[in-house]
């Protein structure tokens, strides 16, 4: 299919919601999964729409059929994406479901907490 030509497998990680147990917070499980995505550099115009602390980090834009979640979508824990041995967090998701080629446009930025 033509829509699959430039897509590649991309490793992702989702942190399930945590809970309190006997008054202590326990993080949720890490759920690894793989998506198919087309990966592109993030245009400067899009970077300007991100929060101030995100604008100077390495960034890519993914086009995929799989819904990914930002921190505000997933109770403060965003989905993570792994590219070239680096960890990125999902910063922005645009849903394009009202077009002939329905997809999500996902902006990811390098996760500084990863230590890379």
Image: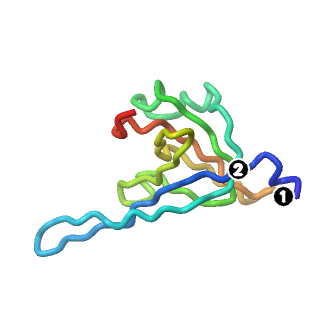
Mark number displayed over residue 8: 2
In the rendered structure, are the residues bearing label 2 and label 1 in contact, judged by CB atoms less than 8 Å apart? Answer: no
**Measured from the top left, where is residue 107 in percent x and y?**
57, 42
Precedes in sequence: disc 2 or disc 1: 2
**Measured from the top left, where is residue 91 in percent x and y?**
49, 43
Check the image and report above or below for 18 versus 71: below
Residue 35 or residue 69, whichever sits in front: 35
Q: Identify the residue at the far left of this view.
A: 23
Say what secondary structure mark 1 lies in.
Answer: loop
Q: Residue at image x 52%, y 46%?
A: 82
Q: How is the image coloured?
A: rainbow
Image quarter of the N terminus: bottom right
**Measured from the top left, where is residue 39 in percent x and y?**
67, 41
Structural distance between the alpha carbons of marks 2 and 1: 21 Å
Q: Identify the residue at the far right of this view.
A: 2
**Measured from the top left, where is residue 105 in percent x and y?**
65, 47
Residue 23 or residue 6, whichever sits in front: 6
Q: Residue at image x 25%, y 70%?
A: 19
Mark number displayed over residue 43: none
Mark number displayed over residue 100: 1
**Label 1: how many residues lie within 10 Å, few (<14), some (14-19) or many (20+)?**
few
Position of residue 16 in the picture relative to residue 69 (left or right):
left
């Amino acid at each position: 299919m033509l829509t699959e030509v430039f897509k590649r497998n991309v490793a992702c990680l989702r942190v399930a919601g945590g809970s309190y147990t006997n008054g202590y917070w326990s993080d949720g499980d890490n759920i690894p999964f793989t998506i198919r995505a087309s990966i592109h550099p993030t245009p400067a115009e899009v970077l300007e729409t991100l929060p101030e602390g995100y604008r100077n980090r390495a960034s890519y834009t993914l086009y995929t059929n799989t819904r990914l979640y930002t921190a505000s979508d997933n109770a403060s824990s965003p989905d993570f994406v792994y590219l070239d041995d680096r960890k990125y967090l999902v910063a922005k998701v645009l849903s394009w479901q009202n077009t002939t080629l329905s997809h999500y446009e996902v902006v990811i930025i390098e996760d500084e907490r990863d230590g890379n």
